[in-house]
Amino acid sequence: MDEYFSPIHTYQVCNVMSPSQNNWLRTSWIPREGARRIYIELKFTLRDCNSMPGVLGTCKETFNMYYYESDRDVGSSIRENQFIKIDTIAADESFTGVDLGVRRLKLNTEVRGVGPLNRRGFYLAFQDIGACIALTSVRVYYKHCVGVSRNLAVFTDVVTGADSSSLVEVRGQCVDHAEERDTPKMYCSAEGEWLVPIGRCVCSAGFEEHRESCEPCEVGFYKPAAGDGVCGKCPQHSHSETRAAVSCPCDSNYYRAADDPPAAVCSRPPSAPVNVISSVNGTSVVLEWDRPLDTGGRSDLQYGVLCQKCSVEGPCEDCTASPGFIPRHTGLMEPRVTVLNLVAHTNYSFCILATNAVTHLSNEASPCAIVNITTNQAAPSEVLAIRQENTSQNSVILLWHEPNQPNGVILEYDVKYYEKIQEGNYKSDNMYCIHCGYSKAFQDSDEEKMHYQNGHVSFPDARFYIDPHTYEDPCQTVHEFAREIEASRIKIEKIIGSGEFGEVCYGRMRLPGKRDAAVALKTLKAGYTEKQKKDFLAEASIMAQFDHPNVIHLEGVVTRSKPVMIITEYMENGSLDAFLRRHDGQFTIIQLVGLLRGIAAGMTYLSDLGYIHRDLAARNILVNSNFVCKVSDFGLSRVLEDDPDAAYTTSGGKIPIRWTAPEAIAYRKFSSASDVWSYGIVMWEVMSYGERPYWNLTNRDVSMV
Ligand code: ACK
């Protein structure tokens, strides 16, 4: 009976009374089956020698265990001395006769390991040397590490090593759709346990890890490279149609640039730039625009400008290569370009394109914002390549071609010459100019026509100012010169003063393709007479003929709706007399002279056009935010009626006595010369910061002086 009272078979021996016992029990041949080290678990009982009287000297309490290796079953031919001893086995617990009385055996369990084994099989043997024992079971086994998956690598079942401390290195194989990062390895210990995992596998592109296996990315997801990462959702405007996608191709009409990563959203070319504004200045134009409304989902916007030159006679021709684009015409990072050296009085059409890094991938033509401009009058370009002929002691003939860009009809040429003292050395203009000077030559001139005089010459004016009163209908006249502006383009913001015909207001004007501009609005008050309207619009007709930085600039007129308005540039600092009084003593002499220089330039321009102002005074000069002075107030009647400083003369006319030249006061001889007199008074006003000319002298006294 075992400890559970089940009947068992045992091998027993108990020759404790007889000396020199040598009893052997041998197993049958046990095939090794790949085991390197085997374990033998013995279960046995052993009777305590002390519990048996008269056995002293012959009774033993141990037995020996042996093994013998062989490649085949050799049966009983093995001699005792061929067995190799494994160990002497003693009982942890032995039993006495009393134990037997209750039929309880004290079962001992002992385990021993043997290795390395090399032959195909082995025998075990037990030697009794005089003990009282019963061997109830012998279990023979070996240990192995059970196959596992670790770090996405499969480690197969492996038998442990030959001795108790050896480790068996096992190389793992990556699971399906995984690849090695570092060679996966583990060690199988003698106890059959896996130790020290090294290296690993990672899921391939298109697959992600799910409990020690690699599963494909679902449709609409992708994984671009092998690694620990999970499948990502396809970026915006891209898709994947199958599982296990490694990339997401772009939806139609969307693209990825060559250096966009697979995770980048797909993008498309931008729409056209918007709100293009052109500012023409002579033969150059500044083009500015706003970013496209649709940037295509990218931030690498660039702009390019194409140029078309259109003449009335023929078709337009490409001119992208010819004018000077500053900074350049393609690859512009800022929404602005300046185009120089255009031909004067010519129509140009510019196409402004926005591009990004995917523009070239699209088959569709890039939409462009078109702006048409007409260039203005401009000075001709330089005369190049002068030839000289028939040089004699005191004459020379100079020949040249018309400049590349005449910018209109050339009226005359200036020839300036200097005395040459030494080879390569010229006397400078102002310091040594004794025999130097100007000559002027007309186009197609020959030497007879060419004349020369000492000093500076003034040239005849190409254009004369036209008195609008020579026309019948003021409304028709004004449109000969000034453009009509739709009232909806104007926003009146505040009243800044009052003029002869109505309020003067500040407002904003927004013209198509132009930037919002501050303007001054002179209004014609309701209930006006036809004569008043005619006089009011006459000022606009006059102003419209002027184009000079020191003469107030007319933007246009509103005549087709009420109130009738004259729109001019806005002059932030108002009229010069009040401006000077507000800043009494605050400017340097140079600054004051700078103001006067501007007024002189404006007046020179007006007199060159044949226009006589008649009321030049600081109150009729306006000053802008850059302290630029501009001549204003071009009404005709106002010389007589409007000016508060005008007084009736003995001849009945109303004249601004303190500013007016004596001959104009005396017999109304107004001329550019009398304007020069008034300019002298303005000089006095400026230098005295807006003092009243002749202080408190009466008009009568002044005219007597
Ligand atoms: O001295 P001010 O401020 O400047 O007051 C007068 C007022 O309107 C009546 O003429 C002002 N004014 C006239 N034209 C303009 C203009 N273009 N810009 C600014 N202010 C103007 C003037």
Image (cartoon, grey):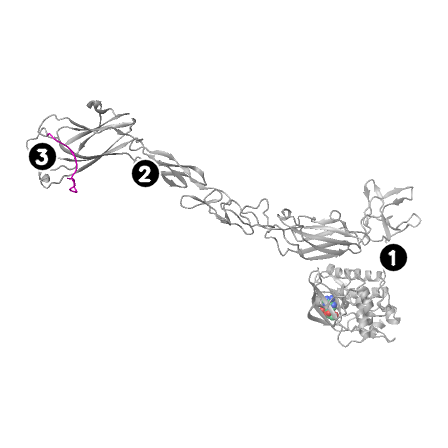
Whether label 3 touches label 2, CB < 8 Å: no
Quarter assignment of residue 556 = bottom right
- Ligand 1, image quadrant it occupies: bottom right
Identity of the residue furthest to the right in this view: 448
Helix, strand or loop at mark 2:
loop
Label whose residue precedes the other's in the sequence (3 or 1): 3
**Residue 11 is covered by the magenta coloring:** yes
Q: CA distance from mark 2 to mark 1?
A: 113 Å
Task: Name the front one of labels 2 and 1.
Answer: 2
Residue identified by numbered label 1? 460
Q: Residue furthest bottom?
A: 527
Question: Hey, what amino acid is under mark 2?
Answer: Glu
- Which badge, 3 or 2, comes first in the chain's sequence? 3
Pointer 2: what residue? Answer: 193
- Relative to 115, say whether 344 is above or below: below
Residues rendered magenta in the picture: 1-15
As drawn, the label of residue 50 is 3
Question: What crowding class fits label 1: few (fewer than 14 Cα within 10 Å), some (14-19), or many (20 or more)?
Answer: few
Q: Position of residue 269 (x, y in %)?
A: 63, 51
| Residue 347 percent across, percent down from the top left | 78, 55
Query: Does residue 156 appear left or right of residue 239 in this picture?
Result: left
